[in-house]
Amino acid sequence: MPRSKRRHLLREVPGGVAAPCGFEATGVRCGVKAGGLDLALIYTVAPAVAAGIFTTNRFQAAPVLVTKDRVGRDPVRGVVVNSGNANACTGPQGYRDAMQMAETAAEALGVPSRAVLVCSTGLVGRPLPMGKIGSGIKKAVVALGPDGGEKAAQAILTTDTRPKSVAVEFELDGRPVRVGGMAKGAGMIAPNMATMLAFLTTDADLSPGLLRSRLVAAANRSFHRITVDGDTSTNDTVLLLANRQAEAAKISPRHGLSRFDEALGFVATHLAHAIVRDGEGASRFIEVRVRGAASREDAVRIAKTIADSPLVKTALAGGDPNWGRILAAAGRAGVEFRPERVDLHLGGVQVVRAGAVCGYRARAARAAVTSPEVRIALDLNDGEQQAVMWTCDLTQEYVRINSEYHT
Amino acid sequence: MPRSKRRHLLREVPGGVAAPCGFEATGVRCGVKAGGLDLALIYTVAPAVAAGIFTTNRFQAAPVLVTKDRVGRDPVRGVVVNSGNANACTGPQGYRDAMQMAETAAEALGVPSRAVLVCSTGLVGRPLPMGKIGSGIKKAVVALGPDGGEKAAQAILTTDTRPKSVAVEFELDGRPVRVGGMAKGAGMIAPNMATMLAFLTTDADLSPGLLRSRLVAAANRSFHRITVDGDTSTNDTVLLLANRQAEAAKISPRHGLSRFDEALGFVATHLAHAIVRDGEGASRFIEVRVRGAASREDAVRIAKTIADSPLVKTALAGGDPNWGRILAAAGRAGVEFRPERVDLHLGGVQVVRAGAVCGYRARAARAAVTSPEVRIALDLNDGEQQAVMWTCDLTQEYVRINSEYHT
């Protein structure tokens, strides 16, 4: 949708996760991470309906197990998140610690124990320093406020270079409704959740079932469309809380749903793009669009194979319009298609026609891939389906960050 | 098999692809590549039976199409290979050029046109400079000799830093039988052929069907077990020629087959390991072994996911025993297993027991992953099957090489 059309429906507002009515947040330093804020708390004055999407990794961190068990069952009053320690691969003690972390927050907030969700991100395999976490939670409860969204977004970061936070407002029944969000993640990012945490909040009123279906739909167009390095983690979580504090009527498929979807989609896509733009060592944002596929699954598979190819990503780091590596990646995606029909555009420049290189101006092609935003469009001319993936280039800096990050 | 046991059966001999009786080879400079030898020729004095394995990429280069069509049908007298230009994505003209390249070699050698196989490797999408190729072939035919194996191994290289060549001899019926080989490849390497060329020669006498089955078996334990970056190319080819010039009797399942398999396996594995050791920017050779899987396919899938994980490979580049990234990669392989049963060893050091970190000496674990040969052993404790993959670490140098290599 063009930005101008979107604008009169959606308005960006400050405040991040605390922008929707009735939400408060904060970020404090408790000393788990080497420096900076490392414990975030989100609080809602009224019980919220919650929906969640979790890592598909076979190894799931203790806080994921605790939170999964609560989301969709119990009304939520708070989410406590620490960075610097993932509480993953920590065995039964890790599970007890995750339960305790939620319990401590619930007590301090004066809410039922099961009303607090918990997330962790950082190093794996180390016991959570419960003393530090406990004092941090107490500090956070005192610091909570409607203007704490930006601090919360700071406190969940690990290798990220900048916070990722956004909120929008739309009107329904003449009343403002808001959706806010924050996310962290810069490496170990792949579709179906990676080392990625995202927290979305809204003051809209939706049934639990509808909330869940909208979250899944929004994630399918945002968080599930990004990849930094194809790696996924043990801790990935996306949570959406709806506390019904806006004064508009309940949202239903007949009332306000498309506006809500648009707002949620804007926030989710904004955060997903922010993760890719902050990809470890990334110098360019890359969109890979595959058109003309026989099925959507085929299109996704090819787009993801291109977006994860180290050779494509290093070529783009070098500003090289290396269409041969793009075709080679498409060709190994395990999808049947006719190579002799394939067209490829880099930005506005057609470089491959009918499976073979076509005459193109080298300077124009180079300009298309040295831009900070590179668009790759592959057309299989073999069907009607399409898909998009967003990724970043693979630089020496990515390797430096990930080889110097020590366990 | 322990080296001592292998030794009394197999003896390494010099000569590479030209070591087996009746084979000659050479490498010359024809000017396609920026510098160095860039055209190799293998010749057999007597017609050879041939078997081949080719890229599974949907995009297949013109020489692959030409060679695939001939292997297994026509007796082979020669193989001509150029480096510097892959003759891929070059459309109908590329196909005509590949045919012409074979034709020119056949004429110069005085053999039937269909008796010559052709391979190319290098940049894609550029027309083959047929004038240079033609003069190179004529030069090569003059230079052919039984001592030209090393020069041929030089002439097929692209980003490789060193030639890969080996030959062995074993006895059958009191007579020597030899298997020789050479390979190229340093990046764009993944199972099922990547930008990898391998040429295997033998003076043994085998039926075409048996030759093919032995090549497939050997490749499954060597070339299909390596990955540098998960990328595959348009040109991958492994060829095995058997010219029956040894004086031993015909090899059959009842006569000499296990010795032949061992010799072929030694040559193929030696070359496969050499490719990984020469992986672009690699500083360590990494073996990933997955045991205790319910099926061999599961074991392969997990081993490959670990071996292709940028996070695992950058951790190893940094000499970090980051078992968390290894478990996370295993967990996203799409295989069902019980995380709480998993054990992990790095070298001789157990770092994970029953899915959780166990007490280990940090110095020992670090020593295990800072060695030039790193062994990762993951046991799922969930079955009897196992698989191994070989790879290398991912360094800043890999990114530098691949971002500076321009189309």
Image: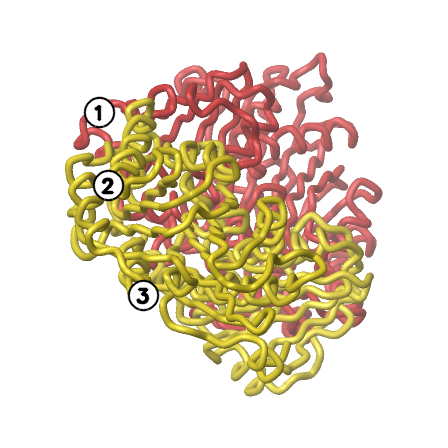
Chain colours: A yellow, B red
Residue A406's x, y, as percent? 24, 45
Where A129 falls versus A161 (above or below)?
Answer: above
- 3D distance between C-alphas at marks 1 and 3: 35 Å
Q: Residue at x 73, y 57 (%)?
A: B109
**Of callouts 2 and 3, the N-terminal one:** 2
Kindly state the secondary structure of the residue where label 2 is placed: helix
Viewer-closest of A214 and B338: A214
Q: Residue at x 47, y 36 (%)?
A: A74
Residue A224's x, y, as percent? 56, 53
Residue at image mark 3: A162
What residue type is disc 3 on?
Answer: Arg
Viewer-closest of A382 and B388: A382
Kindly state the secondary structure of the residue where label 1 is placed: loop
- 3D distance between C-alphas at marks 2 and 3: 29 Å
Residue at image mark 2: A108
Which picture quadrant has residue A299? bottom right
Kindly state the secondary structure of the residue where label 3 is placed: loop
Residue B95 appears in the picture as rendered = no
For disc 1, the chain is B
Where B330 falls versus A310 (above or below)?
Answer: above
The crowding category of the residue bearing disc 2, from other C-alpha atoms within 10 Å (few below 14, some 14 to 19, many at least 20), is some
